[in-house]
Structures are given as C-alpha cells and as structure tokens.
C-alpha cells in the first residue's frame, strides 16, 4: 500500500516560532511537493523538488523554505511563523513518468497563534 | 499550460447520476485529462484519467469528445460518501517533473 505520511495531523505554534513539517514517501518517487489549502483559494503550490537537494519555488514560496536531503523525505520549514500561515499543509509525491498519478499525504492543520 | 474551467459547486440527491463538465479550450496534443477527488480533511486522490473517447473504472466514467475541448466526469448513482471536491486537470504527457496545478475544483454535495 503506497504511502505519503506527514509528521503531524494537527499542530499549534506561536508567532515567531520556527516550524518544521516533515513528509515521507515510500514509493521511491523523484518528485515531491508542498501545497497549502485555504478556504476559497484551492490548493496552492509552495515548493517542489524533483531530486535530492534540488528545490524549486512554487506560486507562494515567501516565508517558507524546504529541505530534501534524502529521496524519501521532504521538509517544509517556516522560519518565523506568522498568523497568516495558519492553514492546511499537504505534501505529495509523484513519479517522473508523464502519466504518473500524484499521491497526497493526510495533511497537517497548522494553527499559528 | 491549458487552463480548466469547472462549476464551483453542484448539489445532487442520493441515487442520481452526477455529471461534472470541465472546459479546457486550449488543450494541446500532448495533454491528457485527469481528475482528482478530495474528501473533507484529506488530501486529494486520483480517480480517473484519459486522452480521448471514454474511460471507465470502478469509481467513475470520463467522457472526452473528439475535439477534446471539454470533458465530463460521470459518477453513477451517487451516495452521501461521494460528497467531495472534484478537480479537473490537464497534464502534459512530457511533464514528468512538472507540478500538477489544482484549481478550486467543483464542490459536490450529495443530499439524502
């Protein structure tokens, strides 16, 4: 059973804290993605990575950074959390083939107080 | 990148067939159509994809006319558990490393 797992389902942090969201996939996928989802705005891409140590900015990278030291793990970092980063964060992975489907994790609901 | 347009929301009663149409007027020869489903508080999951004509699986059917400028996702005899957001995406066959772009989708509400 293929899986994308995220370190937490719910997280509460304070403004200014450094926050790490971890994502692990067991499908040996080259590509990994971080999205955030807010009511009325759909899924928006934050960052993605197509290989170890490679990263590309998505549509809304400001305030975030990422790390991919191993193929199976992709971390999203909020250097200094702010209240406008309260959101649902979704990690996904996908193979390199054009027809490959994308697999999502269960999501982390982050609240920044 | 072919843009897609789909209704914001739809309502249906249990047991009815639901058809969600997606418009993608500038679809390219190398593009195929894929649909994802997202239940509340979960990540989206793939349900069906196709290039042309009709594709059917255990979850849904996908109808794509000859000009491929639109596609219709058909859910037979919906139940309350089909309440979800449905996303239509157009994907380049050669886009192995390109992120999928999810719009706002169609929010389907199934009523008892």
Image (cartoon, coloured by chain):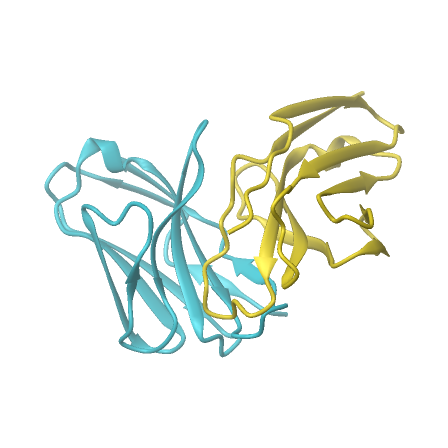
Chain colours: A cyan, B yellow
**Above-or-below relation of A30 to A9:** below
Looking at the rendering, in which quadrant would you find the C terminus of chain A? Answer: top left
* Residue shown at 36% from the left, 71% from the top: A73
Looking at the rendering, in which quadrant would you find the N terminus of chain A? Answer: bottom right
Where residue A32 appears, x then y in whole percent?
A: 42, 65
* Residue shown at 51% from the left, 39% from the top: B103
* Residue shown at 33% from the left, 53% from the top: A58
Where residue A27 appears, x then y in whole percent?
A: 53, 75
**Closer to us: A62 or B112:** A62
In this picture, residue B23 sits left or right of residue B67: left
Give the image quarter of residue A23: bottom left
Total marks shown come to 0
In this picture, residue A53 sits left or right of residue B78: left
Where residue B97 appears, x then y in whole percent?
A: 46, 69
Where residue A36 appears, x then y in whole percent?
A: 38, 44
In this picture, residue A62 sits left or right of residue B12: left
**Closer to us: B29 or B88:** B29
**Closer to us: A69 or A31:** A31
Tell me if residue A17 can be seen.
yes
Tell me if residue A113 can be seen.
no
**Above-or-below relation of A97 to B28:** below
**Above-or-below relation of B52 to A96:** above
């Amino acid at each position: 059973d293929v899986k994308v797992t995220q370190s937490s389902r719910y997280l509460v942090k304070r403004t200014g804290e450094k926050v790490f969201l971890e994502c692990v996939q067991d499908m040996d996928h080259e590509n990994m993605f971080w999205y955030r989802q807010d009511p009325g705005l759909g899924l928006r891409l934050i960052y993605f990575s197509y290989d170890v140590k490679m990263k590309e900015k998505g549509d809304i990278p400001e305030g975030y950074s990422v790390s991919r030291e191993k193929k199976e793990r992709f971390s999203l970092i909020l250097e200094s959390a702010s209240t406008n980063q309260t959101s649902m964060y979704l990690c996904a992975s996908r193979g390199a083939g054009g027809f490959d489907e994308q697999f999502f994790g269960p999501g982390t609901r982050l609240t920044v107080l | 990148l072919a843009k897609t347009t789909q209704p914001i929301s739809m309502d249906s009663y249990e047991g009815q067939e639901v058809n969600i149409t997606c418009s993608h007027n500038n679809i390219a020869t190398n593009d195929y159509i894929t649909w994802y489903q997202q239940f509340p508080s979960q990540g989206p999951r793939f349900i069906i994809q196709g290039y042309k004509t009709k594709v059917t699986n255990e979850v849904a059917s996908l109808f794509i006319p000859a000009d491929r400028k639109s596609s219709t996702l058909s859910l037979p005899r919906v139940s309350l558990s089909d309440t979800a957001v449905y996303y239509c995406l157009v994907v380049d066959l050669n886009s192995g490393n390109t992120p999928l772009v999810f719009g706002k989708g169609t929010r389907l509400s199934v009523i008892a």
